[in-house]
Amino acid sequence: MKNNYIDNNNTGKRDYRRIPEKHMVLIQTCDSIGTVTGNFAEHALTLDYSQGGLRIVIDREIPFDKLLRIDFGSDFVVPQLQGIVKVCWHRELENRPKVIEAGLAFQDHFSQAVLAIQDNFGAFS
């Protein structure tokens, strides 16, 4: 099995290998099993993703304290994959006011396992 994490700048912090691909995703507030709740629904663009989560840009403030469901489209390496994420960090882009960049961490083991299998079989190579 491949080692699919890296030591980020020798800090001892382990990050999963990031895949720099752009995909449109739908983000909605949800409960712990992925059932959509609330009224937040917005499309976002991935900047990169990994077994651990993804980095996105979005044109609207994103709920920091809620679980979110991510719906990937049919063009993703695992078509129609859904995952549950939580915002780890977010910031406004300097050169694009009102555009938010955010780091999202997977909260469900299914998404992590599926992306780990894809990585181990070379789908990300």
Image: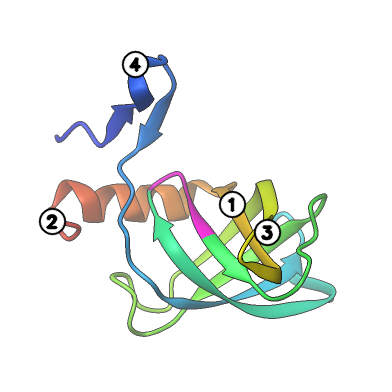
Q: Distance between the residues labelled 2 and 3?
A: 31 Å
Could you tell me the amino acid type at mark 1?
A: Leu
Residue drawn at the location 37% of the way across and 27% of the way down? 8
Q: Find disc 1 in the rendering and name its residue.
A: 104
Could you tell me the amino acid type at mark 4?
A: Asn
* The image quarter in which residue 28 lies: bottom right
Q: Give the main secondary structure of the magenta stretch.
A: strand
Please indicate whether residue 34 sits to the left or right of residue 83 in the image: right
**Quadrant housing the C terminus:** bottom left
Instruction: Provide the secondary structure element on which disc 3 rests.
Output: loop
Dot 3 or dot 4, earlier in sequence: 4
Dot 2 or dot 3, earlier in sequence: 3
Q: Could you say where residue 67 lies in the image, as x and y percent from the top left?
A: 73, 56
Residue 10, numbered label = 4
Q: For the residue carrying disc 2, how many other residues have a C-alpha within 10 Å: few (<14), some (14-19), or many (20+)?
A: few
Q: Distance between the residues labelled 3 and 1?
A: 17 Å
Q: Distance between the residues labelled 4 and 1?
A: 23 Å
Residue 33, numbered label = 3
Q: Distance between the residues labelled 1 and 2?
A: 23 Å
Q: Find disc 2 in the rendering and name its residue.
A: 125
Please indicate whether residue 16 sits to the left or right of residue 117 in the image: right
Q: Could you say where residue 91 lies in the image, as x and y percent from the top left?
A: 69, 52
